[in-house]
Image (spheres, grey):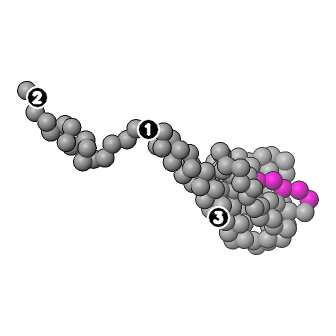
Amino acid sequence: MKINNNRELWSAWMGDHIEDSKVSETFSQQLLRKWVFKGTECGCIFDSDEKGIMVGGYAEGSDAELPTYDLKWGFTINAFKEALDYADADGVEAWNEAEDGSWTEAYASLDMITEEEWNDSTSSTPN
């Protein structure tokens, strides 16, 4: 099945067979924005226009510009899921890279001791 609008995408992705007359294209777009964000590990972004859709990863705390994946109307649900998986993976990777640097800086500022030093200091018997 080819997807030609937000209502069809929502129905194919979520399995909610909505009647065209009851749910507007705008409301379907809002639902997709919400559930693309909530349904992905990194909180992907979603947008659509008369040409098609766009999904992209998101990484809070990262300055990375992540790629977006554009699909022209007439795509399949499998193409959408694949694009969303790629976008989510991009966001997760960028977030992990940003957080790795934060943790390294935080730990570098601590006066840490080794496990051996800890064991030596706690195994001493008081006089």
Q: Is residue 117 left or right of residue 72?
A: left
- The residue labelled by disc 3 is 85
* Residue at image point 53% right, 44% down: 105
Please state the extent of the stretch shown in magenta in the rendering. Answer: 46-50
Q: Is residue 27 left or right of residue 35?
A: right
Task: Tell me the element at label 3.
Answer: helix
Task: Tell me the element at label 2.
Answer: loop
Label 2 to label 3: alpha-carbon separation: 59 Å
Residue 104 point in image, percent of width and height:
51, 48
Q: Which residue type carries mark 3?
A: Asp
Where's the N terminus, which quadrant?
bottom right
Above or below 61: residue 86: below
Q: Which residue type carries mark 1?
A: Leu
Which mark is drawn over residue 126? 2
Q: Which residue type carries mark 2?
A: Pro
Q: Nearer the viewer, residue 76 or 16?
A: 76
Residue 23 point in image, percent of width and height:
80, 48
- The residue labelled by disc 1 is 110
* Residue at image point 50% right, 41% down: 106
